Each structure stands twice: as structure tokens, then as C-alpha cells.
Amino acid sequence: MVYTKQIYSGKGKDVATADHERDVAYTNLKAFLNGYRKLQTAPNYQSAEDLYSVFKTFGLNLDRLSYSSQSAQMKKLIEVLENQENQHKIALLSLDLAFMEMKTKHEDFEALFAY
């Protein structure tokens, strides 16, 4: 999918705010997984390691990419995190709300950026 902006929409601040909120949700989830996976005595640390590996697959710096590149990668990341196995790992770590927040912030950004 290619994202393009054909005309000036006047939504620059709204888009920037939505992108920032998406970045924060992404960064917070990534940081939690990165820290938790290092606690090998913690329950379900392997789930955190596995989920962090999914983040690595799509790049650990998505929040620094252009709007369109980040959107494309975030969409793929969310799709993989939504599979049954990863949803189980997310639930084991009690990250359901954090994942939904990241997904919702991404969808909010997409809705603004697309129009």
C-alpha cells in the first residue's frame, strides 16, 4: 500500500499530534517488552522475548520513520501481533490494553492522515 498526500489538508497539527500519540504507545509497549524479556526469573519472560522479536522484525525505530513508512510497518506489525499465538502471549503479560491502545492510536492516525 502506498500512502500519498495530494493536497494540503490543514490538518498538520492534528496529524502531528496523532503521530506523537501513536509513537508514545508504540515506544511504551516496546520498552516494556525489552525490559521484561531481560528478567529471566520473571514469569512468562519468554513471551516478552518472543513479542520483542516481532518488533525487531519490523524495525525498532518505527517511531522515527516518515508518516507513510511508519504506517506501512505499523500495519504489518499489528497484523502479526493479532495472530492467535501472539495474542496469547500478550494476554499472559497482561498487555491487552497496551496493545489495543497502540492499535487504536495507529487507526486514529490513519483516519486523519488518509484524508
Image: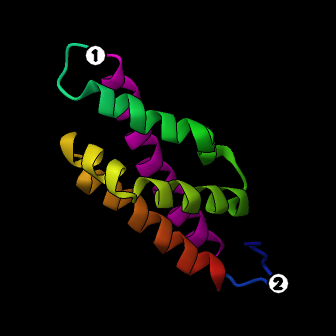
Q: Earlier in the sequence, mark 2 or mark 1?
A: 2
- Secondary element at image label 2: loop
Residue 67 % position (x, y): 68, 61
- Taking the spot 45% from the left edge, 34% from the top edge, the residue there is 52
Q: How many marks?
A: 2
- Taking the spot 27% from the left edge, 14% from the top edge, the residue there is 40
Rendered image quadrant of residue 9: bottom right
Residue sitting farthest toward the top: 41
**Magenta-colored span:** 11-39
Residue sitting farthest toward the right: 6
Residue that numbered label 2 is attached to: 6
- Taking the spot 71% from the left edge, 64% from the top edge, the residue there is 68
Q: Where is the N terminus found, in terms of image quarters?
A: bottom right
Q: Residue 90 or 65: which is nearer the viewer?
A: 90
Q: Is residue 47 above or below residue 8?
A: above
Q: Main secondary structure of the magenta part?
A: helix
Judged left or right of residue 26, residue 37 is left
Judged left or right of residue 111, residue 48 is left
Residue that numbered label 1 is attached to: 39
Q: Determine if the magenta segment contains residue 88.
A: no
Q: Where is the C terminus found, in terms of image quarters?
A: bottom right
Q: Is residue 90 above or below residue 1?
A: above
Viewer-nearest of discs 2 and 1? 1
- Taking the spot 46% from the left edge, 42% from the top edge, the residue there is 27
Q: Amino acid at mark 2?
A: Gln
